[in-house]
């Protein structure tokens, strides 16, 4: 794959080893289809919202794991937060990260 992948942060690091070939294939397909930094992929609003919601859930899970002592979760957390910030064009994670307590979610 010779086409450039989006610059840092290296979101590929978020992918479990078993799914790295799948991730690389999807990136290759998108780049071949003309998607790049200047021509981003377009998704339907509901699909975008579902991906953002899934990412929020992942961030919440990583926060719990990190607070329970998982070094791996703590290492991935800034990258997950950076991805959500980039996806939503936010200034900070606090601008877009839902407050679980306000939503009635108890851990």
Image (tube, rainbow, N blue to C red):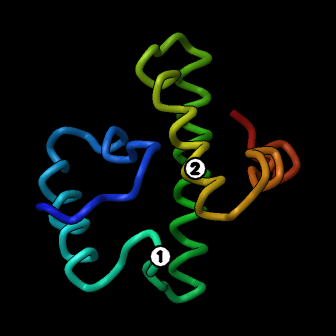
Mark 2 to mark 1 CA distance (whole Å):
29 Å
Residue 16, image x, y percentages: 25, 40
- Tag 1 secondary structure: loop
Q: For the C terminus, give its image quadrant.
A: top right
Residue corresponding to mark 1: 38
Q: For the N terminus, give its image quadrant.
A: bottom left
Q: Quadrant of residue 52?
A: bottom right
Q: Is residue 42 above or below residue 100?
A: below
Q: Is residue 91 above or below residue 2?
A: above
| Outermost residue, top side | 69
Residue at (33, 38) in percent of width and height: 13
Give whichever of 34, 44 is nearer the camera: 34
- Tag 2 secondary structure: helix
State the count of labels: 2
Crowding around mark 1 (Cα neighbors within 10 Å: few <14, some 14 to 19, many 20+) is: few
Evaluate if marks 2 and 1 touch, with contact meaning CB atoms under 8 Å apart.
no
Crowding around mark 2 (Cα neighbors within 10 Å: few <14, some 14 to 19, many 20+) is: some
Q: Quadrant of residue 29?
A: bottom left
Residue 95, image x, y percentages: 83, 52
Left or right of residue 42, residue 24 in this image: left
Residue at (21, 65) in percent of width and height: 3
Residue corresponding to mark 2: 57
Of the image marks 2 and 1, the number of the one nearer the N terminus:
1
Q: Is residue 58 above or below residue 37?
A: above
Residue at (55, 76) in percent of width and height: 48
| Outermost residue, bottom side | 44
Residue at (19, 69) in percent of width and height: 28
Left or right of residue 10, residue 17 in this image: left
Residue 101, image x, y percentages: 84, 42
Give whichever of 49, 64 is nearer the camera: 49
Q: Nearer the viewer, mark 2 or mark 1?
A: 1
């Amino acid at each position: 794959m010779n086409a450039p992948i989006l610059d840092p942060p290296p979101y590929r690091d978020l992918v479990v080893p078993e799914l790295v070939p799948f991730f690389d294939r999807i990136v290759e397909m998108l780049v071949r289809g003309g998607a790049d930094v200047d021509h981003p992929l377009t998704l339907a609003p509901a699909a975008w919202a579902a991906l953002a919601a899934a990412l929020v859930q992942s961030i919440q899970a990583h926060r719990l794991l990190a607070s329970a002592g998982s070094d791996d979760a703590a290492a991935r957390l800034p990258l997950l937060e950076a991805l959500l910030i980039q996806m939503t064009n936010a200034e900070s994670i606090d601008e877009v990260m839902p407050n679980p307590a306000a939503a009635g979610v108890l851990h």
